[in-house]
Image (cartoon, grey):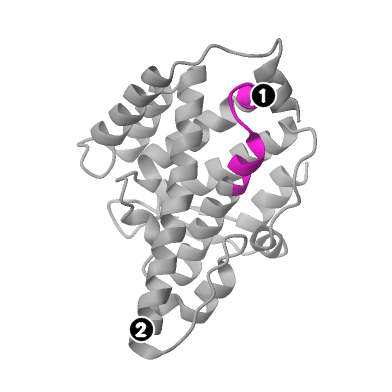
Amino acid sequence: MRWLRRLLGGGRVQLDAGRQQVLLQDVQYRYGARAQIRFSEQVEAVSGLLNSDDGLVVAARIVSQVADEAHADLQAQAQEIHRRTGRRLLVHRRNYRPLWKEAGPALRWPLFALPSGFHPYAQVSAAVAVIGSQASRLDRVTDPNPLVTRMFEVLDLTTAGWEYGRVRIDTDAAGLADRLISSTAQVLAAMDDPPRLPPAVRELMRRNNTLHVHDPAGPRAVGAINLGATMRERLLA
């Protein structure tokens, strides 16, 4: 694997675990729902903080941690539903859409209440942007294969939340989805042997629905997004 050869050979970079921990804690506790600035400004600020090799490692950790926490949350919700009703729900990380189609009204979208406190429209969106902007360097600091899988998971959760989880599509939500699609495409393009697109993405790519995008502060529609067309354009290039 190219990423491992680079870590062991001439492509190796100097990483500082202590610096990574400081960056992670700074991003975790200074930003998110508690911050008194708009999410778009937080994305810009966090992206600037993570503009280094150590920052790229932190960005990858944020995305992976968020995917893991969201999966654990959905598993816990499924177990609670089974305890209360006897209804068994299957939670598959490669494709969350069947779960949401079956039990959407009974589920809570997990990305707004993660144990880490990372917010999808702040730290997560910034981390995804950093990964995309430095995709060509990603295999110098980590294995891109599990990371791109986690990015697809977060994209799956985001779009399922719109369709089944009563998550409002505002400009911050659309920005997260757009960054996820673009950055994942950039990571795939930089990989020697990119994985197949997961089922949820392939399903959405067969669609051509245009969704209204709203102002975060009010009901007014300020734009639109066509997930299928955007995915086809960027992921099949």
Q: Secondary structure at mark 1?
A: helix
- From the top left corner, tell me how far across and down residue 88 is, in percent: 49, 83
Q: Main secondary structure of the magenta part?
A: helix
The quarter of the picture where the N terminus appears is: top right
| Residue 35 visible in the displayed image | yes
Tag 1: residue type? Ser
**At 43% across and 56% down in the image, what residue appears?**
70
Q: Compared to 93, does 133 lie above or below? A: above
Left or right, 92 with reference to 30 = right
Position of 143 relative to 223 (above/below): above
Quarter of image, res 75: bottom left
Find residue 136 and name its label.
1
Q: Residue furthest bottom?
A: 86
Which mark identifies residue 83?
2
Numbered mark located on residue 160 in the image = none
**Amino acid on which the number 2 mark rests in the picture:** Arg
Closest to the observer: 54 or 223? 54
The quadrant holding residue 221 is bottom left
Say which element carries label 2: helix
Q: Is residue 52 above or below residue 142?
A: above
Sequence-first tag of 2 and 1: 2
- Gap between marks 2 and 1 measured at Cα: 46 Å
Q: Which residues are magenta?
A: 136-149
Position of the C terminus, as image quadrant, is: top right
